[in-house]
Each structure stands twice: as structure tokens, then as C-alpha cells.
Image (cartoon, rainbow, N blue to C red):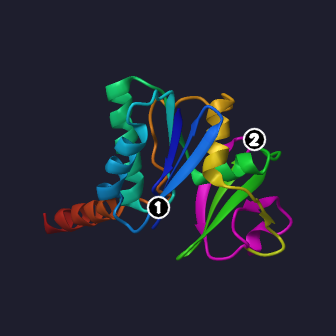
Amino acid sequence: MIVVLDVTGNRGEIVWRDGSTQEACVLEGRKHAETLAPALASLIDGRHLEALGVVTGPGSFTGIRIGIATFLGFRAALNIPVYGISTFDLIWHQAGCPKLPCHVILEQSRGFVVQSYTSTGVRQSMINSLEGFAGQALYSDQALGPEVNQVGGLRLPTFLDLIADAAISPSAELEPCYVRPPDAIRGRNLLDELLAKSR
């Protein structure tokens, strides 16, 4: 059985495939710390786990950490491969791995988050409008206007396919995709500045 998980948003989702059977369950509300472990325990009970996959962000800092920590615990206990993938990379795969350069865009409360795929690597940026990307290859799973190619399909079944088809490799390290630094880091920098001024 392969199990993939996304708890980066208000609603969590678990999708699993056991042989030819594929099923899903939804975790309502932002109570993933309380609901995730019992849901997984009930799901996995007595079944043979082959691999796990977790969406690494962007999204809720807490949700990202809960998902990653939970599956790292399973990996340590069961010695099975764990795969991590960002929502950006899932959309890129759903779009058919378009040729470079291209950009995957997500709309968030503070504007847009863009992950740019180029011949020299991948970079992320936060922008207020899409004006600077006119005429470029843009993809999203959200309806963002005629200039953006909307990618259809469900993210987690795509993730299952990528794992089952060995299209991606297990993750040695599960790197969170936060996009912006955690508030604690920004607070630490501010504290360091204040302490430096007081000396």
C-alpha cells in the first residue's frame, strides 16, 4: 500500500492505493495534530506499507511540520521510503513537465507565489501582480485568468502515480517549502538587532 498526505491547508487529505483499489479520506478543520495520527492508524492497521508521500508546502507552517514529522516517524519505525514534493512540483508534473523556462503560480492571501523553472535552477518569489510575466509559460491549478494555463486533475492521485511509476526518488531529507521565512526567524532577527543596538 502507498499512502500520500497533504495537511498544508485548512482541510487535510489522505489518499492511498492498495493494489488496484484507491481511496481517500478528508481531515476537516485545522486539527491535523489531533486527527492525523488516529486516521493513519486506522487506515494502516494490518496492511503492508510500501511507501509514503507528503506534500511539503507551501501552506500552513504548522500543517507542513505535522505532515513531515509524522511521516519521518513512520520512516524511522518501519524503514520504508518517504517521498516529499511541493505543490509547485506537483502542478508542474500535472502540466506534463513543460519545457523550460516556465512558471507555476499559486494565489495566496498576500498576492501570488511563483516558482520559476529555468535551465539554471528553480527559484521562488512573491509578487503582487502577473504583469511582469506577460507572454511567458504560466501554469496553475487555480483559475487566474486567460494568460495562465489552468492544470486540471487531483494533486494527490498524481503524487501516487509518480511514486508508483518511480518517476520521482525517495527523499533523504524532507525539505519544507515555506516560501517565506517562519515568523520566529524574523522575530529572532529583530531581537538580534535590538540587542546589538543596546550594547
Q: Can residue 122 be seen here? A: no
**Which residue: 14% across, 68% down?**
198
SS of the residue under disc 2: loop
Answer whether residue 131 is magenta in the image: yes
Left or right of 57 on screen, residue 133: right
* Residue bearing mark 2: 119
**Which residue: 31% across, 56% down?**
33
Query: Label 2, label 1: how many angstroms apart (C-alpha)?
Result: 23 Å
Q: Seen from this angle, which residue lies furthest right? A: 135
Report the front residue among 29 and 69.
29
- Mark 2 crowdedness (10 Å alpha carbons): few <14, some 14-19, many ≥20: few
Q: Seen from this angle, which residue lies furthest top? A: 79
The region drawn magenta spans 118-143
Report the front residue among 77 and 114.
77
Question: Mark 2: which amino acid?
Answer: Ser
Quadrant in the picture for the C terminus: bottom left
Left or right of 164 on screen, residue 153: right
Left or right of 147 on screen, residue 177: left
Which tag is nearer the camera, tag 2 or tag 1? 1
- Mark 1 crowdedness (10 Å alpha carbons): few <14, some 14-19, many ≥20: few
Left or right of 6 on screen, residue 111: right
**Which residue: 33% across, 48% down?**
37
Q: Can residue 139 be seen here? A: yes
Q: Position of residue 50 (x, y in %)?
A: 51, 27
Q: Which circle's residue, 2 or 1, is located before the other in the chain?
A: 2
